[in-house]
Amino acid sequence: MDPTEAFNAMMDDFALGMVDDATEHANNLAEWLNKGGFPPVLRISTDGLKVFTVSDQLAREVCRAACRLVLDQPEAGCNPEP
């Protein structure tokens, strides 16, 4: 599994309201992390001025939180930025 691709697919599907697909990615990612798999590579941007690659520990926690959000509140959605 590529957790970065899975995370991106989960977020894309979530943003598009594709609840079943987002849920499947969230379940797969959560299981991957719970079994000790490495987290996705995550970068944080501050309005495009700076981009920071976050530590594995922070990426793991952000990914778990995103999975919980998708699994607990599938109607919440989000707005992707170009």
Image: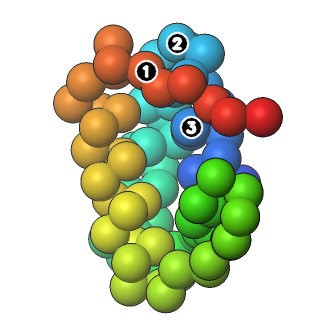
Does the residue at mark 2 contact the one at mark 1 (Cβ under 8 Å)? yes
The x and y percentages for residue 30 are: 37, 57
Of residues 2 and 60, which is closer to you in this image? 60
| Colouring of the image | rainbow
Viewer can see residue 31 = no
The first of marks 3 and 1 along the sequence is 3
Q: Nearer the viewer, residue 43 or 68?
A: 43
Q: CA distance from mark 2 to mark 1?
A: 6 Å
> Would residue 76 appear left or right of 9 to someone viewing this image?
left
Mark drawn on residue 77: 1
* Residue 48 x %, y %: 72, 57
Q: Which residue is mark 3?
A: 11
Is 56 placed above or below 7 here?
A: below
Mark 2 packing: few (<14 Cα in 10 Å), some, or many (20+)? Answer: some
Residue 17 is marked as: 2
Residue at 33 percent of width and 19 percent of height: 76
Residue at the (68%, 34%) spot, across then down? 81
Vertical side of 54 occupied by 21: above or below? above
| Mark 3 and mark 1: Cα distance apart in space | 9 Å
Q: Amino acid at mark 3?
A: Met
Q: Position of residue 3 (x, y in %)?
A: 61, 63
Residue placed at 38% from the left, 62% from the top? 62
Q: Quadrant of the N terminus?
A: bottom right
- Of all residues, the one furthest to the right in this rendering is 82
